[in-house]
Image (tube, rainbow, N blue to C red):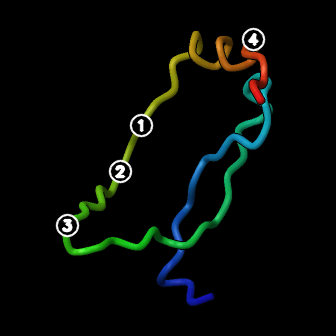
Amino acid sequence: MDSAKLMRAIRIHEYGGQHTLVEEQVTLPFVDADDVLIAVQNTSVNPVSIQWIGKCEKVG
């Protein structure tokens, strides 16, 4: 993979608390002519949301 086409992402692969948040290098998404790619410089996570994710049951 070309490092110029990678981005850092925080991803969740399983249900649980904040320990399920994993930083990964992922490829940039493909942007078609009628799509928009937004570059996010800063963000935050609400602690209540993390607690809610940890209490969710997996469906399916």
Q: Position of residue 26 (x, y in %)?
A: 60, 67
Q: Which residue is mark 1?
A: 43
- Foreground pick, 5 / 29: 29
Above/below status of 45 relative to 7: above
Q: Nearer the viewer, mark 1 or mark 4?
A: 4
The answer to whether mark 4 and mark 2 are in CB contact below 8 A is no
Amino acid type shown at disc 2: Val
Amino acid type shown at disc 3: Asp
Per the rendering, the mark at residue 34 is 3
The answer to whether mark 3 and mark 4 are in CB contact below 8 A is no
Question: Mark 2: few, some, or many residues within 10 Å (few <14, many ≥20)?
Answer: few
Quarter that holds the C terminus: top right
Q: Which residue is mark 4?
A: 55
Helix or strand or loop: what does disc 3 sit on?
Answer: loop
Distance from label 1 to label 2 (Cα)?
A: 7 Å
Amino acid type shown at disc 1: Thr
Please report whichever mark, 3 or 2, sits nearer to the chain's N-terminal start: 3
Q: Position of residue 13 (x, y in %)?
A: 75, 43
Query: Seen from this angle, which residue lies furthest bottom?
Result: 2
Res 42 quadrant in image: top left
The answer to whether mark 3 and mark 2 are in CB contact below 8 A is no
The answer to whether mark 1 and mark 4 are in CB contact below 8 A is no
Helix or strand or loop: what does disc 1 sit on?
Answer: loop
Question: Mark 4: few, some, or many residues within 10 Å (few <14, many ≥20)?
Answer: few
Please report whichever mark, 4 or 2, sits nearer to the chain's N-terminal start: 2
